[in-house]
Image (cartoon, grey):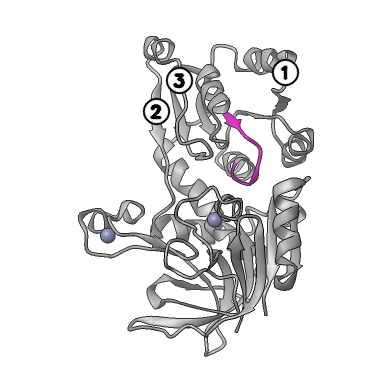
């Protein structure tokens, strides 16, 4: 089968690979469309210790079973019997694995093999372009389940990339009273404006940072860091109200400093959100089936064979592209 293989940092190429052999409980899926995730990009750049070349990346997919059923797949495979799994926190499974990570082959290939229990059938009306968002959106469903914002909440979102934008769309569905998006890219801020943000601010300048603080006023109820840089994390605390909640999602920097004493005096609550459970995945799919969340205006599709170009574009100049898709079959 054809596969897009990550061969070296910043390099992917089409190679012929043996078709996967499904083990017990697994089924073979013919991939039709695969999404490029921020974590695949960090792998591509050579920044991930768990994505070592040569390997096939990718975990966001729409495909067909041998019987012809269109499906999406929850790519986070948990063991099902550890304490975390049994308590419904499969995202914290002691031996979780993900397609396109470590030794589990990813979906930038004609076929992928995955446990049948990970599959969800989708109706024909739900296009590949829309359905493939189910995995990134599941992360957002999960964080809102943790954050459990109160009615009429005011929210801040630091980082207007794919995750920040999905959080914005979801917050609007949840009835957010006012929502601020901060980024350093004017293109992304324009996207946030078209999505219906209350205020989008470029915080690259001193003026922008002051404007964000003025908007936050006494501070926002819930602030999401969807960036993961040290500066972004600190600014999430800066715009959070006393007693408010900061949700940390972005993972770009492993370590960073926080002005803890200021936050302790404000009794900031902190939550960290990682991945999603099957419950979140199902809720995410329900939102997409209902047409309530749609990234397709900011989605670009390229052929699997153009994988190198697609990755180059997403690493150097994504512009207003929030989701890059690879068309496989
Ligand atoms: Zn993803
Ligand atoms: Zn487990």
> Badge 2: how crowded within 10 Å, few (<14), some, or many (20+)?
some
- Residue designated by label 2: 270
Q: Mark 2 or mark 1, which is nearer the start of the sequence? A: 1
Residue 9: x, y in percent? Answer: 61, 55
Identified at 54% across, 47% down, the residue is 47
Label whose residue precedes the other's in the sequence (3 or 1):
1
Q: Is residue 179 left or right of residue 54?
A: right
Q: CA distance from mark 3 to mark 1?
A: 21 Å
The question of residue 157 being in magenta is answered with: yes
What secondary structure is marked by label 1?
helix
Can you tell me whether the CB of the residue at mark 1 lies under 8 Å from the nearest atom of ligand 1? no
The image position of residue 32, as x and y in percent, is 64, 76
Answer above or below: position of 301 versus 187.
below
Say whether residue 327 is visible: yes
Q: Which residue sits at x=47%, y=27%? A: 256
Place of residue 145 in the rendered image (x, y in percent of width and height, measured from the top left): 42, 43
Which residue in the protein does label 3 denote?
A: 258
| CA distance for labels 3 and 2 | 12 Å
Please identify the quadrant where the C terminus is shown: bottom right
Helix, strand or loop status at disc 3? loop
């Amino acid at each position: 089968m054809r596969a897009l293989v990550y061969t070296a940092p910043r390099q992917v190429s089409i190679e012929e690979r043996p078709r996967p052999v499904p083990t017990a409980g697994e089924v073979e899926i013919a991939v039709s469309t695969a999404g490029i995730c921020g974590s695949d990009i960090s792998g591509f750049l050579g920044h991930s210790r768990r994505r070592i070349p040569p390997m096939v990346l990718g975990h966001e997919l729409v495909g067909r079973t041998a019987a012809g059923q269109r499906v999406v797949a929850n790519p986070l495979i948990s063991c099902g019997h550890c304490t975390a799994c049994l308590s419904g926190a499969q995202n914290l499974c002691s031996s979780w694995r993900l397609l396109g990570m470590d030794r589990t082959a990813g979906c930038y290939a004609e076929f992928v093999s995955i446990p049948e229990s990970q599959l969800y059938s989708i109706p024909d009306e739900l296009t590949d372009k829309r359905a493939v968002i189910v995995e990134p959106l599941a992360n957002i469903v999960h964080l809102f389940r943790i954050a459990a914002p109160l009615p009429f909440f005011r929210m801040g979102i630091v980082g207007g990339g794919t995750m920040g934008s999905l959080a914005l769309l979801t917050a609007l569905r949840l009835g957010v009273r006012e929502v601020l998006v901060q980024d350093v890219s004017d293109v992304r801020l324009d996207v946030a404006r078209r999505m219906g943000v209350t205020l989008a601010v470029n915080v690259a300048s001193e003026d922008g940072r002051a404007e964000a603080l003025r908007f936050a006023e006494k501070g926002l109820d819930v602030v999401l860091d969807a960036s993961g840089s040290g500066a972004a994390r600190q600014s999430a605390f800066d715009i959070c109200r006393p007693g408010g909640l900061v949700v940390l999602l972005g993972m770009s920097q492993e370590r960073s400093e926080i002005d803890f004493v200021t936050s302790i005096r404000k009794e900031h609550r902190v939550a960290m959100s990682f991945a999603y459970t099957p419950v979140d995945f199902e809720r995410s799919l329900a939102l997409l089936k209902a047409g309530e969340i749609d990234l397709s205006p900011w989605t670009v599709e390229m052929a699997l064979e153009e994988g190198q170009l697609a990755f180059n574009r997403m690493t150097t100049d994504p512009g207003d592209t929030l989701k890059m898709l690879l068309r496989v079959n």
